[in-house]
Structure formats: C-alpha cells, structure tokens
C-alpha cells in the first residue's frame, strides 16, 4: 500500500505496451494517479518491429479485463473473439484505442525514455526513511532533454525488445558480431522477410539461429521465397523435439501446425539443419563467415545474411540504484525465478503469482510483464495482466484482492518464445505460450 508521505506523487508506469496500459487501467479503477512513460512515439511502439507476425492466441485471450471495461464503456466493440490478430492489428484495434481514451491519454507521455530509477536525494546505500522517500525517475526526451519525475511507486513494464541476446557462446557477443551488425549482415530480430526486409534475404544463403518459435516462423516465411533462397537453421541444442512441439495435441491449433510444417520442410531438405552449433566468432569478406564449434570439431559456414532468433534479456542498468532481489540464474524477481526457470518449467507449469512474488526490498517497486521473467523465455501475456491487477490492488490497499491470483495455464509441452517485450499466450481454457512470426504470441517493449 502507498504510504501517506508519498501519495502526493503518481505511480509511474514504464512502457505503454499491453502490460503497461493494463496497469494504467487497473490503477484508474481505484482512482490512483499514474503517469505512463513510453520511449516511443505511440502506444505499443515496439510492436512495429514485429507487427507483421500473427499471434497464436485469439482475441479473446489478448485483452486485459480492466482495459476492456474502459474501452467498452466508450462504445468500443471487441474484435472477433476467435480471430488471430497480427501485431499491427493488436496495436491498431486494441492498444491505440485504449491509449486514446481520455481516462488514460492525459497521463501518457511519449518520447520519454527512462534512463534511471532511484529515490529522491537517496542513493542505494541509504536506509533511513527510505520507504517514505519518493522515487526519482529520470527520463530523456527525443530532443535530448533530461527531466526527473517523482513517483509514489514504480511499475517497470518496459519489456526486453531493446536488448536481444548476443549470438556468441557463454552469453557474450561473439568477436566480429558488432561489425557484422554494422555491415548489415546480421538483421534485427524478427525481420519481415516476405515484406519490408525481403530484399535483404531473397535469393541469398540465409542462416537462422535459435530454437524457439521466432526462429520457426522466420524459417517458414523464408521457405515460401523462391528456390534460390538457401536456408540454414543453426541451433545449439542437439534435439529439435521441443521446437516441433505438440502437433495435433497442442492446445493452440495454430502453434501445433507451425511445428508440423517446420518438420516437413526439414525432412524434405528445404531447410538444412546444423545442430549442436555454437558460434564462436564472425569474419567479414565477400560474405559473412560464421565460425562455430560442434561435436565434430570447428566449422565455418559462409552465408549472405544471418537472422538472429535467440531471445532477449532484461536491461537492468537503469535500475542500478534500487535495492533489488533478483534470481541469480534468470534475473527475474527472486521468488519468481525458481517458478519459471526454463530448465525445469514450461509456461504451463508456472504457478499463479502476484504482488507478493514480484516484490523487492525496494518497497513499491515492481518489474512486470516480459521483463519480470528476466531471461526465461516462457512469458504469457495473460500472466502479465494478472501481475498488474494484483499490484494495483496492493497499492490501493486491498490486500485480499492482491493475494487472490487466478491463472490456469495449459501444459502442452510447447512453451518457448524468443520474442522480447511482452508475450502473450492463452489457450482454450485460459492461456498458452508466447512465440513469434507469421504465427506468434505477443512481444512488446518500451
């Protein structure tokens, strides 16, 4: 609950994606003041990077309850509940109308990138009266101007889209990776290979790295280009079973079909697969040479362009002056980390969690949405909606509502995503997993 010494300041929400705007809607209902700080020029700005992709989950699972109540009160009609929206449709038909509601619009600031969060006049080492001191949120505007905003609480829903994982081994950039990026030989995550980015790949020898749904969708899109486009799929794993997924048993039919189609293309030879392929460095000549280690020794593969689909990680530098308790493995809130560690859990086995699990030693500071899952790739958008509902209830002083978390997730054995921002995913009963291109499950960022 907010303390009396800080209630004169609003709750600051970082990010105007699906989870950030849902947080705003849930704070609006109990009449708690808030400000949404969005680094882009519009709501859901990060979605423009992957808007060509289609979600696995239909509209009925992509809408937050409080947001939907506000929209319907304004005369908005929800899209066909069973239709699968693209990212662009999600933004145009849901996020933009939501952000334009007068109840929210006057409290959203665009082109306001958060660079740091601390306590006003108090650094990380100071304990005295810390909880009574308002947060200081430093922002940078598009014209380079810096400004400090005071807050009673901070909800970081900034996502992970801006921080893709490096391609090298051991979680590090591979030597030569920056140069290859600068030369345009490595694309941004989730390129639109059939549209905006077609000329970068068509007729070329293309390598796709990663073993999640983002990689799978990109591979399917590439396979529909002309036969002169050669496709190589490089993965660190030795087994592709999880990528192919549950097939007809998958609770999301679109996701099950994705794995089945991909397996057929691999079996037919249209896609060449390199398993147990760990990239060690890149070199640039007439082409991009990818150097790797494999069980059979070192290997070099020359390609025209490489498409990375290796996931994302949270940007934690802006939170360095806060007292956080993060899981040492996945960099999620410490109580959440063991529940979502991908070595032990799929998204269907994650326990429902709310404000208590997401709390930190820094009172009234929360990381939510995709960023709350740190490096774990199994976030569901429905999970994010329940997170912010619980947090808003706690800030409003309704402990009972905050602790009454409700989320049932299907266990299909197919719960991997390498999108960043905030994924979505629900299935017939309630939810399903995140993913990417052509058929994905939501990913948003700041």
Image (cartoon, rainbow, N blue to C red):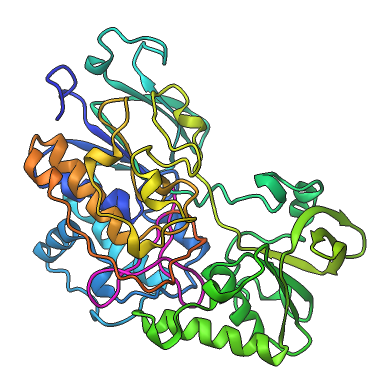
Q: Which residues are magenta?
A: 422-446
Magenta highlight on residue 426? yes
Q: Is residue 356 above or below residue 230?
A: above
Residue 34 screen position, x and y as percent: 22, 37
Please state, as top left, top right, bottom left or bottom right, where the N terminus lies in the image: top left
Q: Nearer the viewer, residue 383 or 186?
A: 383
Tell me if residue 82 comes above or below residue 446 in the rendering: below
User: On screen, 436 above or below 344?
Assistant: below
- In the picture, measured across the screen, residue 300 lies left or right of residue 178, that is right
Hey, which quadrant is residue 232 in on the image? Answer: bottom right
Residue that appears at 47% across and 40% down: 331
Main secondary structure of the magenta stretch: loop
- Residue 424 in sight from this viewpoint: no
Q: Residue furthest top?
A: 128
Q: Nearer the viewer, residue 433 or 287?
A: 433
Across and down, in percent, residue 142 comes to 50, 39
Residue furthest to the bottom in view is 268
- Kindly identify the residue that appears in the image at 77 percent across and 61 percent down: 185
């Amino acid at each position: 609950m907010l303390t009396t010494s800080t209630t004169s300041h609003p709750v600051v929400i970082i990010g105007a994606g699906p989870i950030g705007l849902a947080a705003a809607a849930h704070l609006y209902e109990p009449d708690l003041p808030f400000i949404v700080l969005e680094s882009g020029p519009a709501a859901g700005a990060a979605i423009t990077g992957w808007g060509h992709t289609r979600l696995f989950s239909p509209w009925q699972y992509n809408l937050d309850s409080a947001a939907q109540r506000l929209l319907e009160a304004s005369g908005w009609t929800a899209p066909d509940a069973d239709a699968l929206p693209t990212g662009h449709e999600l933004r145009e038909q849901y996020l933009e109308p939501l952000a334009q509601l007068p109840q929210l619009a006057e409290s959203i600031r665009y082109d306001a990138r958060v660079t740091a969060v601390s306590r006003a006049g108090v650094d990380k080492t100071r304990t005295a009266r810390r909880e009574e001191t308002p947060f200081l949120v430093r922002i940078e505007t598009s014209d380079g101007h810096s400004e400090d905003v005071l807050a009673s609480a901070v909800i970081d829903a900034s996502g992970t889209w801006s921080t893709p994982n490096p391609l090298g081994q051991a979680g590090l950039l591979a030597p030569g990776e920056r140069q290859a990026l600068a030369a345009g030989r490595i694309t941004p995550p989730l390129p639109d290979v059939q549209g905006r980015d077609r000329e970068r790949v068509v007729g070329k020898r293309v390598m796709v790295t990663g073993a999640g749904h983002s990689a799978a969708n990109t591979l399917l899109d590439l396979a529909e280009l002309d036969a002169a486009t050669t496709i190589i799929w490089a993965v660190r794993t030795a087994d592709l079973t999880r990528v192919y997924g549950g097939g007809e048993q998958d609770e999301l039919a679109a996701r099950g079909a994705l794995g089945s189609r991909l397996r057929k293309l691999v079996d037919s030879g249209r896609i060449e697969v390199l398993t147990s392929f760990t990239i060690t460095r890149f070199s640039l000549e007439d082409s991009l040479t990818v150097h790797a280690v494999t069980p059979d020794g070192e290997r070099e593969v020359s390609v025209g362009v490489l498409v990375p689909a290796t996931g994302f990680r949270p940007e934690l530098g802006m939170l360095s002056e806060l007292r956080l308790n993060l899981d040492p493995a996945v960099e999620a809130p410490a109580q959440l980390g063991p529940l979502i560690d991908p070595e032990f859990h799929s998204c269907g086995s994650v326990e429902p969690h709310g404000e208590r699990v997401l709390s930190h030693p820094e009172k009234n500071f929360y990381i939510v949405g995709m960023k709350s899952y740190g490096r774990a790739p199994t976030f569901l958008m429905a999970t994010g909606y329940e997170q912010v509902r619980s947090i808003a209830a706690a800030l409003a002083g309704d402990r009972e509502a905050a602790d009454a978390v409700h989320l049932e997730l299907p266990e299909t054995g197919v719960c991997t995503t390498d999108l960043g921002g905030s994924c979505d995913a629900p299935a017939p009963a309630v939810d399903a997993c995140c993913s990417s291109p052509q058929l994905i499950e939501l990913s948003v960022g700041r």
